[in-house]
Image: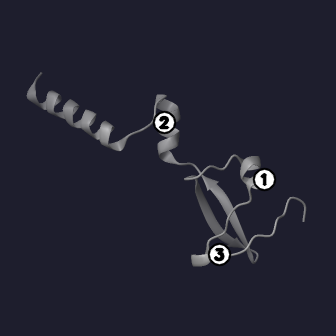
């Protein structure tokens, strides 16, 4: 099979994606993958990470803690009439 590589199932059933394939797909640590069975084969598909999409849209890294504080300040200002 073209582009195929053999990997070993490790402890806790982990599988390491070979570097050549990671680089070809641009996979990075922390990327989300969907795994499913199709015709007796395991299929891995990249899933869009909503936080990375948000980061690309707003142009800066998304921090839930920081954004939550900004939202709380906005809500307090909006409800106090300032």
Left or right: where does residue 47 sit relative to residue 1? Answer: left
Of labels 2 and 3, earlier in sequence is: 3
28, 50: nearer the viewer: 28
The image shows residue 57 at horizontal and vertical percentages of 50, 32
- What residue is disc 2 on? 55
Q: Which residue is located at x 42 percent, y 38 percent? A: 62
Mark 2 vs mark 3: in front: 3
Q: Is label 2 in a helix, a strand or a loop?
A: helix
Would you identify the image quadrant in which residue 81 lies? top left
Q: Is label 1 in a helix, a strand or a loop?
A: helix
- What residue is disc 3 on? 10
Where does the C terminus fall, quadrant-wise? top left
Would you identify the image quadrant in which residue 37 lies? bottom right
Where does the N terminus fall, quadrant-wise? bottom right
Q: Is residue 41 above or below residue 4?
A: below
State the residue lying farthest toward the right: 2
C-alpha gap between disc 1 and disc 3: 19 Å
The image shows residue 12 at horizontal and vertical percentages of 57, 77
Q: Is residue 14 above or below residue 74?
A: below
Could you say which disc has been placed on residue 20 in the image? Answer: 1
Mark 2 vs mark 1: in front: 1
Could you say which disc has been placed on residue 32 in the image? Answer: none
Q: Which residue is located at x 53 percent, y 48 percent? A: 49
The image shows residue 68 at horizontal and vertical percentages of 28, 40
The image shows residue 40 at horizontal and vertical percentages of 75, 78
Within 10 Å of disc 1 (Cα), the crowding (few <14, some 14-19, many 20+) is: few
């Amino acid at each position: 099979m073209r582009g195929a590589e053999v990997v070993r199932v490790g402890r806790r059933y982990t599988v390491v994606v070979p570097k050549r394939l990671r680089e070809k797909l641009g996979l990075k640590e922390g990327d989300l993958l969907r795994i499913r069975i199709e015709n007796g084969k395991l299929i891995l598909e990249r899933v869009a990470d909503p936080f990375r999409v948000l980061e690309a849209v707003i142009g800066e890294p998304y921090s839930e803690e920081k954004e939550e504080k900004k939202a709380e300040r906005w809500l307090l200002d909006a409800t106090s009439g300032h």
